[in-house]
Image (cartoon, helix red, strand yellow):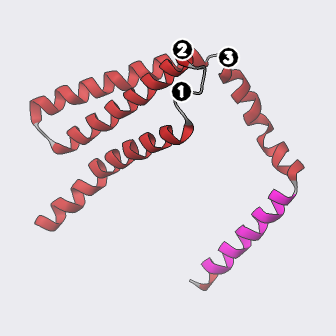
Amino acid sequence: MRFMHILGIAVVLVLVVIVGQGSLIGSITDPLRVLANSAQQFDFITRIIVFIFALAVAIVAGMAWDRTHNQKIAFVALAFGLMAFKWLLKVMDLFVSSGQFFPDHAENVIELVSLALIAYALFGMRLREGKEK
């Protein structure tokens, strides 16, 4: 246990040194900048594809829930429905105000709720089922 504390402190110190050396951070993230600049060219089509994919998964999960009435599937369907809603807003954002209609903090809340729904479907239901047995 003592080793883990020392290792944690060492990692924090290394990160402080790296952050202090701005040029080192820049050289580490340079390949990511190339990828991000390339992806920016396809932003519009990517938003539409992700919206359609999230909507399709939500619909299929909703149909599966309608057949089985399994609560786990219902939470997954809700999560993907919420993701589809978020991506619909992101697509609309391009037309309404070119990036200012749907702020990042609102997007973060929707993502957090979506992830919480999926995590609950995967882990929370199992924990609840284990307590009932």
Q: Secondary structure at mark 3?
A: loop
Q: Position of residue 112 (x, y in %)?
A: 43, 46
- 52 vs 129, left or right, is right
> For the magenta stretch, what is the residue range?
4-20
Q: Is residue 92 above or below residue 67?
A: above
Mark 1 residue crowding within 10 angstroms, few (<14) / some (14–19) / many (20+): some
Q: Is residue 32 above or below residue 72?
A: above
Q: Position of residue 22 (x, y in %)?
A: 86, 51
- 15 vs 117, left or right, is right
Badge number at residue 2: none
Q: Secondary structure at mark 2?
A: helix
- Mark 3 is on which residue type? Gln
Q: Position of residue 25 (x, y in %)?
A: 81, 49
- Residue that numbered label 3 is attached to: 41
Q: Nearer the viewer, mark 2 or mark 3?
A: 2
- Residue that numbered label 1 is attached to: 101
Mark 3 residue crowding within 10 angstroms, few (<14) / some (14–19) / many (20+): few
Q: Are marks 2 and 3 in contact (CB under 8 Å)?
A: no
Identify the residue at horizontal 55%, vertical 35% (top origin). 103
- Residue that numbered label 2 is attached to: 95
Identify the residue at horizontal 43%, vertical 22% (top origin). 88
Q: Reading the chain from its start, which is encountered first: label 1 or label 2?
A: 2
